[in-house]
Amino acid sequence: MAQCRSRLCLVAFFLFSVMMMISSVPTAEAKLGIHFHKWEVKYAYKSPDCFKKLAITINGDSPGPTIYAAQGDRVVVTLTNTLPTENVAVHWHGIRQIGTPWSDGTEGVTQCPIMPGDSFTYEFVVDRAGTYLYHAHYGLQLSAGLYGFIIVSVPLHGVPEPFVYDKDRSIILKDWYHATTYEQSTSLSSIPFGWVGEPQSLLINGRGRFNCSLLNAPSSDHSEICEAKIPECSPYSLTVVHGETYRLRIGSLTSLSALSFQIEGHNMTVVEADGNYVEPFQTKNLYINSGETYSVLVTADQDPSRNYWITTNVVSREPSTPTGLAIFNYYPNHPHKYPPTAPTTGPLWNDTASQLAQSRAIRAHHDFVQPPPPRSDRVIVLLNTQNLIDGYNRWSLNNRSLTLPHTPYLIALKQNFTDAFDQNPPSYDIANYDISKVPDNVNATSSNAVYRISFNTTVDIILQNANTMTPGSSETHPWHMHGHDFWVLGYGSNKFDMVKDPATYNLVDPILKNTVALYPYGWTALRFRTDNPGVWIFHCHIEPHFFMGMGIVFEAGVEMVGTLPTSIMGCGETKRLINP
Ligand SMILES: *[C@@H]1O[C@H](CO)[C@@H](O)[C@H](O)[C@H]1NC(C)=O
Ligand SMILES: *[C@@H]1O[C@H](CO)[C@@H](O)[C@H](O)[C@H]1NC(C)=O
Ligand SMILES: *[C@@H]1O[C@H](CO)[C@@H](O)[C@H](O)[C@H]1NC(C)=O
Ligand SMILES: *[C@@H]1O[C@H](CO)[C@@H](O)[C@H](O)[C@H]1NC(C)=O
Ligand SMILES: *[C@@H]1O[C@H](CO)[C@@H](O)[C@H](O)[C@H]1NC(C)=O
Ligand SMILES: *[C@@H]1O[C@H](CO)[C@@H](O)[C@H](O)[C@H]1NC(C)=O
Ligand SMILES: *[C@@H]1O[C@H](CO)[C@@H](O)[C@H](O)[C@H]1NC(C)=O
Ligand SMILES: [Cu+2]
């Protein structure tokens, strides 16, 4: 308690005390909800887009089961890894893990991997209502299908949400690859480099449609592995009653694709983003990046004698993946009756201006504004580049491509294992860097150094985009922060100007988010408070980009973290902690 001077710290301490009480007094469980889940992570044959392949499932399902809880509840997930040869770890995306940094589920950062045959228990409090996600945080296992929703409701006597609706529904979006994670990771880490390419299908609630005829080359018979007629790959159908308003929780856990989402003939009102209330605005197309969640309100107010298309399309990269389809079904039409119209194709993939316009339209709801501190104590500029390291294709921040150490940072930092990772913090000056051209020297170095940041301070991060190793090319990157939400202070479409651009920041009603887009050749400015003791990763949510080193790790207040559970140990130097 002596060290606990901030309100958040007190809240964390309170929650911790409550948790301790609950553990010793089982009868208290009914009051504060506790949700126990038993998950078996295993391979199973799945045909989500009609093409049969092995997917990583939870209890046989992909997407996995939705975790429902009320704000303040505790979630306990005991996971058993029954993959024959692969490790696993699961991240609770958007849950800040206040007081439980060891449950963040980030292999190499907050825990050792869960080995085949082993079990691990994640335990954390969901401290805020909203729409969150979970997914694998080991290798490329997200692309193999380990993903799902966490939906946190307002507690019985909590502050009501600033909008009303009749029904609550959810839609999770995914891009789907036919190659295995082994094939993908091998080609990404080979010379010559092999890119994963565009996905074969887009899935809406785990259902998509691949054109099986594309496989039926005369020389091979793939009829067993791709079957267009099976129910497993018939489009998802969302049944609505005319006149009712639906809250649609939309989450994306794509490996690569940024998406647009639309419901034919219906507008959507955006009301929530990443667990924070949005000043409502209307849109026909919702842009959504991997790692983002939105709630939109949709009123079923169109001609109810027919069904409508729900569609999702690739944006930001030139698409070669067909539109993802689902059915907006007006009761009592048959849920699987196709709409009489051709599916809408959505906005132009390269209309960055309208994506940027949506990003700028997302402001905090006027009744829920938490203004950011007016100034920051530290500014970190991160130049995003594509590089070569010893001939391997990588992504770097400030010329450093992240490699994770054998000893997870949280344990190494807490135990003062100074030899576990590179002790030289990266420093870099991008003043003379020309973001518009292929760098003169694309060589960079890999690093597992940590940004050590003072606890209880305000930090700005300026994400600066640049040209890739291909002339005339700069990509969109969705950046995701663990353990914190950040205020989105602004976006720009060129090189950040340290003098002029901060004057354009929105310090009045910026949205708090955990994932934000960095657009081609542009910058995105964020501010956050280091109010959650631990070691956290901040990374591009495009899975192959993160695999190729696109992330940084930062530490703040690690000395305030409570005793680490031994269950997170067992790898690298941590072996000696559990085998005295
Ligand atoms: C954190 O900083 C705020 C404002 O600077 C200060 O009022 C508070 O006491 C600090 N809390 C801790 C735990 O240091
Ligand atoms: C599926 O692919 C075949 C072979 O290329 C093509 O003839 C057919 O038009 C495609 N069907 C659809 C619905 O795109
Ligand atoms: C959707 O919104 C646009 C612009 O606000 C409006 O012109 C259009 O009529 C709306 N469509 C429906 C179906 O409400
Ligand atoms: C967008 O891409 C299309 C091809 O898909 C191209 O014809 C068009 O010129 C591009 N527009 C811009 C603004 O780059
Ligand atoms: C980059 O690295 C490669 C191999 O490590 C080396 O052959 C090449 O000369 C380097 N390029 C420059 C411009 O330094
Ligand atoms: C690590 O170092 C800090 C600061 O020097 C010290 O307070 C702490 O006790 C050390 N922890 C361990 C496990 O040695
Ligand atoms: C990045 O690293 C390369 C190779 O070490 C070096 O040539 C280049 O100048 C560095 N870039 C900057 C902006 O420091
Ligand atoms: Cu990226």
Image: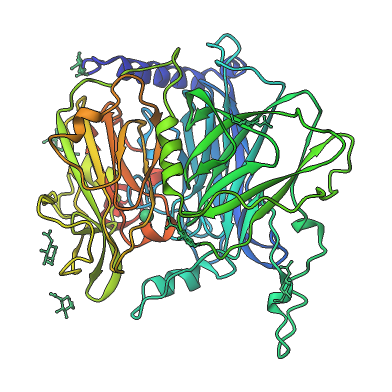
- Residue name at image x 28 percent, y 68 percent: 469
Residue 230 lies, with reference to residue 565, above or below; the image says: below
Q: Nearer the viewer, residue 442 or 482?
A: 442
Question: In the picture, residue 209 is in which quadrant?
Answer: bottom right
Horizontal relation, residue 62 to residue 102: left or right? right
Question: In the picture, residue 364 is in which quadrant?
Answer: top left
Residue 218 lies, with reference to residue 15, above or below; the image says: below
Horizontal relation, residue 170 to residue 512: left or right? right
x, y percentage for residue 465? 28, 51
Dividing the image into four equal quarters, which quarter contains ligand 3?
Answer: top right
x, y percentage for residue 202? 61, 56
Residue furthest to the top in view is 157
Q: Is residue 580 visible?
A: no
- Residue name at image x 56 percent, y 17 percent: 32
- Report the quarter where the N terminus lies: top left
**How are the residues colored?**
rainbow
Q: Nearer the viewer, residue 526 or 543?
A: 526
Residue 161 lies, with reference to residue 81, above or below; the image says: above
x, y percentage for residue 461? 24, 38
Q: Nearer the viewer, residue 297 or 542?
A: 297
Q: How many marks?
A: 0
Q: Is residue 73 visible?
A: yes
x, y percentage for residue 493? 30, 45
- Residue name at image x 75 percent, y 52 percent: 235
Horizontal relation, residue 281 to residue 517: left or right? right
Residue furthest to the bottom in view is 219
